[in-house]
Amino acid sequence: MVTNNVAVLLIYRCTSGPIMNRIPPGDQAVERTYERTWDEIEQMLTRAEVKRNQWKKWFEECKSSADREGMKEAARNHKALDGVIKTLRWTLGEVGVGDPLA
């Protein structure tokens, strides 16, 4: 849990100094509460995996009926959820999961 003083310091550090040149205008005062529990993150990972599997199933259904637009939508959403899942696994410190941005 982050105390108010630490949260203010984090916001200050994110909105001042040399890093300011890299933060787009309007995004400078992002407030983070750091109130998520590990359990909440793990539940979100489970939900993301279920949703990704649903999109994979939908892709296969669209493929069998030659619905190319449906296949494209399913593939895009499946790929997006791959990124979400990798990021959540990285956040949880899962062994073998590399930098999600690499």
Image (cartoon, helix red, strand yellow):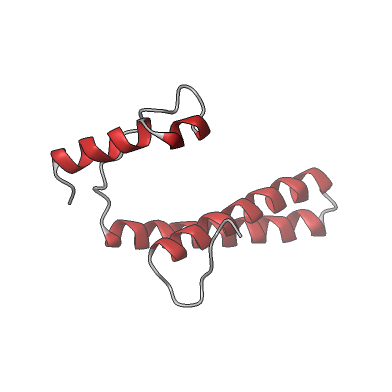
Q: Residue furthest top?
A: 26
Picture residue at 39% right of the left edge, 69% below the top: 93
Please tell me in which quadrant of the rendered image residue 59 appears. bottom right
x, y percentage for residue 12?
A: 29, 33
Q: On the rendered structure, is 46 left or right of 2?
A: right
Q: On the rendered structure, is 88 left or right of 78?
A: left
Picture residue at 83% right of the left edge, 47% below the top: 68
Q: On the rendered structure, is 10 left or right of 26?
A: left
Picture residue at 51% right of the left edge, 77% below the top: 96
Q: Is residue 41 above or below residue 94?
A: above
Picture residue at 43% right of the left edge, 72% below the top: 94
x, y percentage for residue 87?
A: 49, 58
x, y percentage for residue 55?
A: 63, 55
x, y percentage for residue 5?
A: 14, 39
Q: On the rendered structure, is 45 left or right of 98?
A: left
Q: Nearer the viewer, residue 90 or 85?
A: 90
Q: Is residue 99 above or below residue 35?
A: below
